[in-house]
Amino acid sequence: MRLRKCERCIAALSLIWFVFGITFTIMLLMSASQDKQETIDAVMRYEKNSLLAVNTSQEAIRKESPKQSAGATEYVKVYAEEKNELYTSVAVPGERWPAPDYDIHAFYYIWYGNPTLNGKYLHWNHQYLPHWDGKMAVQWPTGFHIPPDDIGSNFYPELGLYSSANVSTIREHMIQLRTAGIGVISVSWYPPDQADGQGESTDYLIPRILDVANQYSIKVCLHIEPYKGRSASSLSTMLQYIFHNYGNHAAFYRRKHRGRELPLFYIYDSYNVKKQEWVRLFKPDGDLSIRNTKLDGIYIGLLVEQKHQEELISSGFDGYYTYFASDGFTHGSKGQNWKELSQQAVANDVFFIPSVGPGYIDDRIRPWNKINTQLRKDGNYYELKFRLAIEAAPRIISITSFNEWHEGTQIEKAVPKKTKFYKYEDYLPNQSDFYLLLTRKWIHKFKRHKG
Ligand SMILES: *[C@@H]1O[C@H](CO)[C@@H](O)[C@H](O)[C@H]1NC(C)=O
Ligand SMILES: *[C@@H]1O[C@H](CO)[C@@H](O)[C@H](O)[C@H]1NC(C)=O
Ligand SMILES: *[C@@H]1O[C@H](CO)[C@@H](O)[C@H](O)[C@H]1NC(C)=O
């Protein structure tokens, strides 16, 4: 009797626990997905807000030290000196490397700077970005990282805290890209008078990137960032600037498409601009249409949510890419969705360009964002993403990234480093070129798959 009574009360208790457990799990899941949406929003908002921030901070710098604006002149001088050497340097010993694959595009960042070349650190000292919720924000560190021992990255570059303006560094990068077999870099681009939230304007570097890339048979395309005031008419103006200044360079990437050789552009956060705007540029009957003009090209928009697939196509884009290296961060970044996204692209005669990445970790700049961390698992994460991409049979695969160090998506050479404050992640037990070699292996598989 007693026992049965007890059994009953255990059953009742279990039931209560069960109901409680389910409710709790549902609540947890709901809050997790709400959290995720907020993280996505925060990460997306980040560029927009930080653009405003840099505007003011750059103005402040200009006011404080008028010499700073002489920086650009200084670079030009250094470049002019190095240019001689660049053009007389020994030819590239091509046999060491596989042929560059122009169907492989790596996202490349030119916002890094150091005191020797730039008068101060740029980007290596990245700010700790505050949590979107003010109440949460107070628990996390604030301010900037203090290089050289403390940088805004979980990994440490083998080339040290380089300046993207250094021609020797650019050359080193080209060698690493060729080692991997990559044929195209997609360079993060802001208009000449703008920059991202942490850096300074970088457009003046494009000519030297093109020149050095050309020496290594690497092609360059641009990744149009969500610069301030981006609209159909401003982009039309910017495209005229780009085509006029870079369009005829031998290293400016062009691709055969519908019987013509057209340049290709990635347009980051394209959803930030309304469809009515894109239509003006990309539809043949738009009032600012670039179609069949000298600004025509292959324009690739960013697919974040599922609905963007239809939106981008009906806006007149020539295709979509997924950018984010953290699987499942968005609909587009989920490898499981790539087959379907690819089939829809084929059905609509547009490009699907999945973005594969070696992992993701950004808690040195977003300490509250561990939820999106993707460990590299000694290369297994990268291999899985590459396999899913190849299985989706796209014409082009993009790599996030060659050197986005803040988000830990870089395949660039990294070295172990331990300081008083922090032990950096590394590629051990493998060497610094591990991700370049893995890339080479998977590009080979991609080539074979294409036949
Ligand atoms: C940004 O700077 C430019 C000039 O440097 C100025 O015209 C513009 O108003 C500034 N914008 C903001 C939002 O501060
Ligand atoms: C440019 O990079 C090279 C190779 O990393 C380095 O030896 C050199 O000191 C750098 N030049 C400047 C001016 O910082
Ligand atoms: C990476 O390291 C593992 C374990 O030591 C080894 O088996 C593998 O061959 C290495 N890969 C490369 C590409 O060096």
Image (cartoon, rainbow, N blue to C red):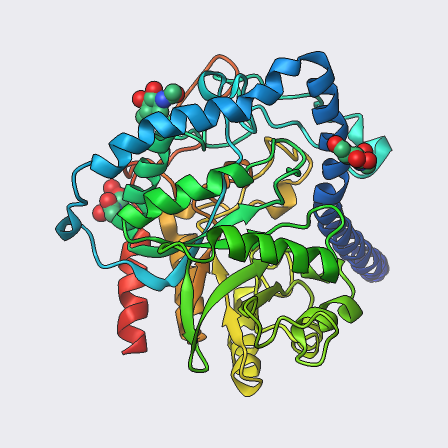
Residue at image x 31%, y 37%?
171
Image x and y of residue 233, in percent: 73, 60
270 or 442: nearer the viewer: 270
Looking at the rendering, which quadrant does residue 54 occupy? top right
Q: How many marks?
A: 0
Q: Quadrant of ligand 3?
A: top left
Q: Is residue 194 above or below residue 246?
A: above
The correct choice, above or below, for 202 with respect to 389 in the image is above
* 137 shown above or below 240: above
Q: Is residue 423 visible?
A: no
Find the residue positioned furthest to the bottom.
347
Q: Relative to 329, say whether 60 is above or below.
A: above
Q: Position of residue 448 (x, y in %)?
A: 26, 73
The quadrant holding residue 318 is bottom right
What quarter of the picture does the C terminus occupy?
Answer: bottom left
Residue placed at 56% from the left, 57% from the top? 323
367 left or right of 42 in image: left
x%, y% of residue 114?
48, 21
Observer able to see residue 176: yes
Q: Is residue 72 left or right of residue 442?
A: right
Figure quadrant of residue 105: bottom left
| Residue in the foreground of this view, choosing between 340 and 237 | 237
Tell me the quadrant of the picture where the N terminus can be found: bottom right
Residue 380: horizontal and vertical position, in percent? 39, 53
Going by the image, does 306 lie left or right of 17?
A: left
